[in-house]
Amino acid sequence: GMDFFTAVNDLKERIANYEAVYETVDEEEIDKKGTSISFIKVINLSSKVIANNVHGRIARNVLTFLMNLHIVPRPIFLVRAPDPDGLMLDDNEYSGDSLGAITPGGVMPVREGEIVSDVSQDPSKPIFGNPIPRQLSQDLLLSNSPGVDAVVAFADERNAVLELAGEVNIAVIRRGNSTGSCTVHYQTVDGTARAGQHYNHTSGVVTFQSGETRAEIKIVLLDCQNSSLPEESFTVVLSGPQPSSALLGKRKECAVTILNDDAGLPPLLRRDWSRLRFPPASKLGQTLNDGGKAVADRLARMLAEQVHEFYLALHKQKLERLKVMRDVAEIHVHTLKDEINQTEFRRTVVEEAFRLQERMADSHAPAGQNFTTSIKLVGHLYNRNLLEKTLDFIELNDGTVRSVGEPDMGGSSHHLSSVVLKVQGIRDQKVVDSIIAKIEQLFDADKKALREEGKPILEGYGFQVVEATKDVGELGKLNRQLEEKRKLLEEAEMDVIKAKRAVDDHARMGEDEIHASASKEYPTQVFTSTATVSRETGERCFVEDSHHEEISNLNMVDIGACHGMTLADLYDSMGKDSVRQFLTLPYIARVPGGESLKDVVHRVEPFVVDHIERQRSACVVVSHLSTLQVLYQYFVGASSRLPFWKLHIPRGSVIQLVPHLFGFEERRFSFKQENIEARGQDYVAVHMASHWTG
C-alpha cells in the first residue's frame, strides 16, 4: 500500500538499520582473499543463504537459524501459567520458577532500593516493569511552572543494598515530554558512609536520548572490613537539568543505605527473606483447581479474541493483496490493448509503404515479405544428384539456402546422407509451397527408380519439413506479434475476471467464515512445558483447530535441592561468597544442584529455532517465569534496557509480541483478581509499545 517514494524511503531505512548492525563485506575483498575470509550472506530474508569458510557452532546453530528464519508478522503469546489456586499474587511464597527473582532485579531488589514487598498489593505500582513512585503525580504538576514540560527525578527516595553486591544502580526517570535529549548532573555526598572507604565517589552527567524515560547511575561499593555499624548511608544529588524546559522533581536526592553483611544476613532482609519460600517438591505436580481453571479460562478467552483479531488482519491483508493483483491484471489488459493498437497502426503504415513499393516495382509478389522454412533431406543425396536438384528448385525461385548444422556425407548404398537446409528470401507463400511440392515429387520419383532397379529403400529415406513456413519480413513479424499479443490479452482478461471474482468472494466473507478458513490454514500452535499447571492451562486454550505440544525445554528452572527452603535458609546454606555471585554474576549463578539462567538460555534456544521461527501461525507459549524471560529477551533484543531476569511477569498474565522486520509490537495483558471480583467481569490491563532494535 506504499507509494513509490514511501517505498524507496522505507528501503533506505532498512538498509541503514542493516549497516548499523552488520559489517559490510566488500566484494573486491572477497575476490582478493578468496576462501580465507569468513562471511554469511543472506539474500531476500533467508530465501538464499551463502556461507563461506564458516565452521563450528556458527555453522551448526547460526546457519540453521538463518535458514529457518521467517520474519512474518504473527502474534507470539508468552503466557505465564496461573497459580493452581488461581491467585494472581505470590503472597508470602517465592514462586521458585526463576533464579532471576533472587538477583537484584527480582524479589531481592536491594540494588533497586526496594526491600522485598508485594508489587501487586501496592496501587502505585504497575502490573509490569519498574515501580511507579507514589509522589510522581505531584512531581508532574507542571502547570505551576510555566514553560516546563518535563520532570527529572530519582525513581525512589531511598535505596538499600548489601555490601557484598559490589555496586548499586540508582534509577533516574524523566516524565512529561520525552522528545529530544535531556541531561542532568549528579554527584555522591558522604553521610555515615565515606567515599574511598565504603564506596567510590561518583559524579557525572545522565543523558536521556529522545524517547528515553529511564537511566541508571552506577556506584561501586567497597568491602569495608572494619565497620561495626549494621549500616552506613550516603546520598546521591541531582542538579542542573537541561534544557531549560526540564525541571528537577521533589526526589532530587536519593539516600543509599549499605547493609553490613559481615555478621551474616542483615535483620531487615532476614525478616523479608524468611517470608519467601521455594515451593516444596510436592507442589510441582499440583493440578489446577476451580480458581486456577477460572483464571485459565479467562486467559483462554482473551487469547481467542486476540487470535481472532489476527485472523481478521490476515484476511484484510489477503484482500488487499487480491485487490492489488486485480489492479495489476487490469493494468496489464490496458497495456496489451495499447500495444495491440500500436502494432496495428505500425502494420497499417508498413502495408501502405509496401503497397507503394509494389506499384513502383511492378511486381505481383507483396513487398516486404520474406518467407522462410527448414527442410531435411535424407537419402543418396550425392550419387543420385538429389541435393543438386533441390538447390536448383530453390535458386530458380530467387531463394537463398544455407546448411544448418553439420551434414552427414554418407557415401555408400548402406549409409544414407542427410542435410538440413534453411530456405529464405522468397517473397510469396505460394512459391515456398511450390518448392516443397517439387522436392517431395523429386524424392518420390527417386524412390520409384530405386524399386525399379531392385535396390532397397533404407529406413528414413525421404524428405521432411522441420520448420513450418513463416514470414520473417516486417509484415510477418508484425502479424506474429499481433497474434501473440491477442492471445496474451485473452489470458489477461481471464485473469481480471478471476481476480475480481476472488476479491468479491473475500469481501463477502463474514467473521465466522473468515475465522473458520484462517484457522484451518493457520492453526494456532500451543506449546507448554511438561508441568501439570502449564499443560492444563494450554489444554484449555484453543481446543479446536490448534496444535498442542509439550516440550521439556520450556520447563521451569531447576532449583536443585532448594525445595521448601526460604531465601534466608538459602543464604545461610550458600554462604556469603555464593550470594555475592548471585548479585554480581546472576546470569551464571546456580543454586545447589540446580540450573543457572545461562543453562535455561541454552535449552530454550533450540525450541526457538525449531518451533517459533518456522511458524507462520499464531504461537502460544505457556511456561514459567525464567523461560518466558529468555523468550522475551530473544525477541526484544537490544531494545530491552534491563537484563531479562528483571522482567516482571505476574502469574496468569500474557505478553503478546508481533515481530516485524526491525523490531516488534508489544501488548501486555494481566488479570487482577481483586478487580475482577469487584467489577464482576474480566479486567485486562493493556500496554502498547513499539521498539526498534536498530
Image (tube, helix red, strand yellow):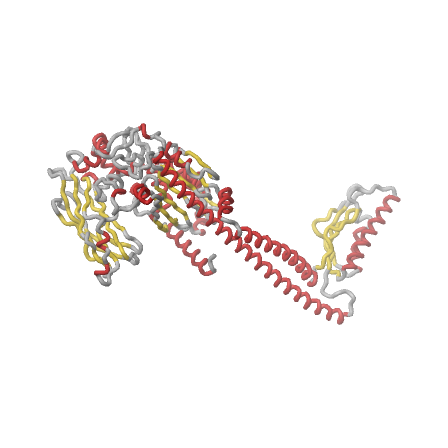
Location of residue 572 (image quadrant): top left
Q: Number of marks in the image? A: 0
Asked whether, in this view, residue 225 is left or right of residue 671, the answer is left
**Residue 553 visible in image:** no
Q: Is residue 328 above or below residue 87?
A: below
Q: Position of residue 293 (x, y in %)?
A: 37, 36
Asked whether, in this view, residue 458 is left or right of residue 637, the answer is right
Q: In the image, what residue occupies the spot 24% across and 63% down?
A: 147
**Residue 273 visible in image:** yes
Asked whether, in this view, residue 122 is left or right of residue 59, the answer is left
Q: Position of residue 425 (x, y in %)?
A: 73, 60
Location of residue 480 (image quadrant): bottom right
* Nearer to the camera, 493 or 134: 134
Q: Position of residue 593 (x, y in %)?
A: 30, 29
Location of residue 647 (image quadrant): top left
Q: In the image, what residue occupies the spot 44% across and 36% down?
A: 548
Of all residues shown, which one is farthest toward the right?
452
Q: In the image, what residue occupies the spot 23% across and 51% down?
A: 172
Q: Position of residue 321 (x, y in %)?
A: 51, 53
* Nearer to the camera, 377 or 242: 242
